Image: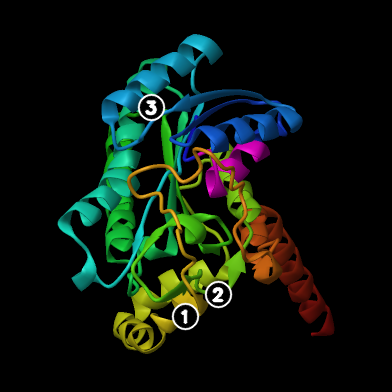
Amino acid sequence: MITGASAGVGRAAAIRFARDGAQVALIARGRAGLEAARADVERAGGRALTVQADVADAAALEQAAARVEAELGPIDVWINSAMVTVFAPFAELTVEEFRRVTDVTYLGQVHGAMAALRRMRARDRGTIVQVGSALAYRGIPLQSAYCGAKHAVQGFTESLRTELLHDGSRVWITMVQLPALNTPQFDWCKSKMPRRAQPVPPIYQPEVAADAIHFAAHHRRRELYVGASTAIVISGNKLAPGLGDWYLARTGVDSQMYDGPQPRGRRDNLWQPADDQRDFGAHGAFDARAHRRSLELWAVKHKRALAAIGLAALTAGSVAALRRR
């Protein structure tokens, strides 16, 4: 079960699971994007079921989950990926815009976890993957509503995890913290800025995020940082948050825009889906600048092997030193 599955990270994750022959439930608002995602899943070897639903509507998401289980069987993995944002200074946001970002990006994950747990607790199995961001730890300018929502998801997930552990539940919840990604969100997010929005480099392809989500769904890791930039941002913010404030105040606004005015007649997806008539796919406009692999993620996935190699090297070095003595 993947929310936000019609484009971006959700779309790439759906294709990644389909390569295992999985049955994938695709949840989103846009009909054209959902139908194209269904075709991608089936081409990759999976079976797809599409359901139009807004994750801000808890009742609609609950109905979607009931339909998925009726048609595909028990949900083993639930991935909360849906998001919206408004690209603007806080002073220019309306109360309604801020609430909408919160309803989708934060409460959408709460609603998803509730619907998943209603089913998984009874079976005492299942995994919930919360799609997060480096911005769950480090706020940046022009993204106050989005950063607040991702911070909230982080706190909520930690709280829920402790409750599951207290209950001895075998249901697992994990959070995948993502870097800047080449997704369509920059084509369709609501923006009040004079120039086009862009992710803060380094930029990664959505398939890197999909690989991390797939790994998190099959390994009981508390949290995954994707991309060296994510690890650096989160660790740096813990060590020197004031330095981060200063640096982002100087560079954070310009680094999120690039030359060129906003296109005329540009649609945004804050209130209505932008992909109801047109499919945007998984990728955005930054293919030429996006990394297809993450060395940091590779190291996380192979940390046991790397630890074993390190231990073997240390042992060999110790033996060699003893022989020299």
| Residue bearing the label numbered 1 | 255
Q: Viewed as shown, does residue 140 lie left or right of 288?
A: left
User: Which residue is painted at 35% across and 36% down in the image?
Assistant: 55
Quadrant in which residue 190 is drawn: bottom left
User: What is the span of residues highlighted in magenta in the rendered image?
Assistant: 5-16
Q: Is residue 68 above or below residue 186?
A: above
Predominant SS of the magenta segment: helix
User: Which residue is painted at 39% across and 76% down in the image?
Assistant: 194
Single out the residue that lies furthest toward the front: 264
Q: Which one is nearer the viewer's eye here, 194 or 19?
A: 194
Image disc number at residue 116: 3
Image disc number at residue 53: none
Given the image, on which type of amino acid does mark 2 rest?
Pro
Asked which secondary structure carries label 2, the reply is loop
**CA–CA distance in space, label 3 to label 1:** 38 Å
Asked which secondary structure carries label 3, the reply is helix
Work out whether residue 214 can be spotted.
no
Badge 3 or badge 1: first in the primary sequence: 3
Pointer 1 with pointer 2, Cβ within 8 A: yes
| Residue bearing the label numbered 2 | 201
Badge 1 or badge 2: first in the primary sequence: 2
User: Which residue is painted at 40% across and 49% down in the image?
Assistant: 269
Point out residue 270 in the picture as x, y percentages from the top left corner.
Answer: 35, 50
